[in-house]
Amino acid sequence: MASASTKNQEIIVDGTSSVRTLVLNRPQQLNALSYQMISNLLEKFVSYEDDPSVKLVILKGQGRAFCSGGDLLSVAQIGTTEGRWDVCSKYFRVEYTLNYIMATNETPQVSILNGIIMGGGTGISIHGRFRIATEKTYFAMPETTRGIFPVVGASYFLSKLPGFFGEYIGLTGPRLDGAEMLACGLATHFVPSKALPSLEKELSKVDTLDPSVICAMIDWFAQKVPLMDNSAYHRLDVINRCFSRRTIEEILSALENEAEHGADAWLSKAIKSLNSASPISLKICLRSIREGRVQGLDKCLIREYRMSCHALLEKFSQDFYEVADNDNLGIQWPSVFPKRLFLALAGARAIMLDKDKSPKWKPSKLELVSEEMVDHYFSKVDKEGWRDLELSPRKNSIYNLAKTRL
């Protein structure tokens, strides 16, 4: 629990001379990442890498979440003094740069995923060298059912999962527990939550950059845990058979064909999720992960930045905002800021506000989403003042993710 002196700090810094512990401290918001938080994290990770006395960074969350994702309400507040379309692009630019720095950082990072981890929370953890799951871990990437698509480097790390499990996660947004994260490689270790205080005490003694020493410390507390009988990971053969198909339509048809020959619950959930998701988000997501299979993280992040900016500009679709009847929502809007940005991320009108869970997607059907529409999201943004994401070459050119399980 945060002390009186730290309760208003969004990030609490603790630790010894050689170990820094960063605690995401917005428990009431499930540690959703504000612009200030990602800017602060970026500054700290850069400074720690330049400080030879820092040997290890531990990242964890206060309360029942590690991090539930990005807080676009906070992003909206940035724009109250500007009122420009590109306000979110600033957030994404800093966030994706942070993801890149984490992935190429020479100072080892241990992320303790003891709770909810979604969206932007995956970007600040999965790219680090060590990811510790527990029995309380709740992982999900439900973006396509929210009118958007997985970003924060997800097209890179999802494409590196066994078989086509990444396509399954990205397209259907299933919940994974700690054992499933460990099995597929999203987590590097499973440690019971009751052992975390002892593990952190041991890690506080680290005085080396040698990851093998840190790994040995974590191994001492780690456990092998079996998958639940109903885990979809047991059906990786079926997942590979279906999600390896070339198009969303072919994937959906293959799943429906499998369902005719067996009544697995995960199949029904996957089909339902695909049928309820934003059609254009599904097609963008699939292409993004497929491109991630042959690209490095830097290229993935640059592409995802373009995708995110195009979603803001809504040339072909407003699914990123989904703001039906927004004049009657009863919300006090900043006078110089677009109303719809407050509703960004999550098919918000339907899921967060009206709670009818019936988003009005446009285009409404898969067959109405053309190749031209999808291509548009992968191109540079043709707008005055816009600039591409630039990621400078780093000393550590081998991504941390590649050095562990994946």
Image (spheres, rainbow, N blue to C red):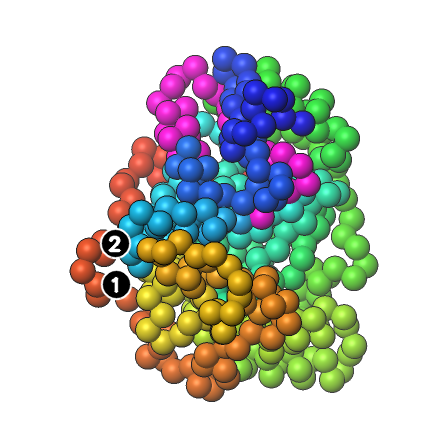
Disc 2 residue type (three-letter): Asp
Position of 331 compared to 262: left or right?
Answer: left
Which stretch is magenta? 41-68
Badge 1: residue crowd in 10 Å (few <14, some 14–19, many ≥20): some
Disc 1 residue type (three-letter): Lys
Percent across and percent down for residue 25 are 57, 34
Can residue 63 be found in the magenta stretch?
A: yes
How many numbered discs? 2
Element type at mark 2:
loop
Q: Who is closer to the viewer here, 306 or 37? A: 37
Residue depicted at x 40% and y 54%: 334
Vertically, is 199 above or below 63?
Answer: above
Residue 380's tag is 1
Percent across and percent down for residue 11 are 51, 31
Can residue 188 be found in the magenta stretch?
A: no
The answer to the question of whether label 2 and label 1 lie on touching residues, with beta carbons closer than 8 A, is: yes
Q: Which of marks 2 and 1 is nearer the N terminus?
A: 1
Q: Who is closer to the viewer here, 32 or 169? A: 32
Q: In which quarter of the image is residue 235?
A: bottom right
Q: Disc 2 designates what residue?
A: 388
Badge 2: residue crowd in 10 Å (few <14, some 14–19, many ≥20): few
Residue at the outermost bottom position? 367
Between the C-alphas of marks 2 and 1, the distance is 7 Å
Residue 13's tag is none
Vertically, is 202 above or below 178?
Answer: above
Position of 262 compared to 37: left or right?
Answer: right
Residue depicted at x 46% and y 43%: 34
Percent across and percent down for residue 351 are 60, 65
One can see residue 105 in this view:
no
One can see residue 142 in this view:
yes
Q: In which quarter of the image is residue 224?
A: top right
